[in-house]
Image (cartoon, rainbow, N blue to C red):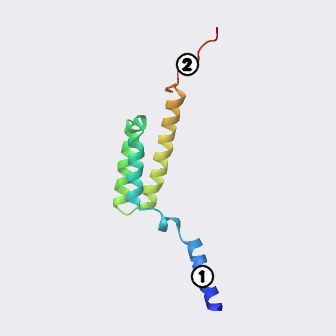
Amino acid sequence: MKQAALLAGALAFAAITTPVHAIAPSCQGQIDALKAAVANQPKAAAEASIRTKLNEAQRLCSENKDEESQALARDIRQQVDRSNASGEASGSSTAPPPQKQQ
């Protein structure tokens, strides 16, 4: 009984201390998902700097430089978010203007 408790404790500890990248999707899977997300954002997809960074992240991934690729992917996500926010702030909303009361 004592051994079972020790084994359970060891497994729980191992699960807690497992590095995130060991259970995260593959580097290539993350880049593919990011590419799909960018493709769904026309304004972001049109930015050459985002496309260039995506290609660089892809290259880093293929060279097994996962940490560098993921850091670049974070930068890309932030840039896409900024691009979307600036598009929303510039009045690209599809909501009709408010009607005047008579």
- Between residues 9 and 26, which one lies in front from this camera angle? 9
User: As shown in the figure, which amino acid type bears the numbered disc 1?
Assistant: Ala
- Depicted 99 relative to depicted 86: above or below: above
In primary-sequence order, the first of circles 2 and 1 is 1
User: As shown in the figure, which amino acid type bears the numbered disc 2?
Assistant: Pro
Residue occupied by mark 2: 97
- Depicted 41 relative to depicted 92: above or below: below
All told, the count of numbered labels is 2
Quadrant assignment for the N terminus = bottom right
- Between residues 6 and 56, which one lies in front from this camera angle? 6
The crowding category of the residue bearing disc 1, from other C-alpha atoms within 10 Å (few below 14, some 14 to 19, many at least 20), is few
Residue occupied by mark 1: 10
Image-based side of 10 in relation to 35, left or right: right
> Residue 51 appears at what percent x and percent y?
37, 43
- Depicted 40 relative to depicted 29: above or below: above
Who's the residue at 60% across and 82% down the image?
8
Q: Please tell me whether mark 1 sits on a helix, a strand or a loop.
A: helix
Quadrant assignment for the C terminus = top right
Please say if the residues under marks 2 and 1 sit with CB atoms less than 8 Å apart: no
> Residue 69 appears at what percent x and percent y?
42, 56
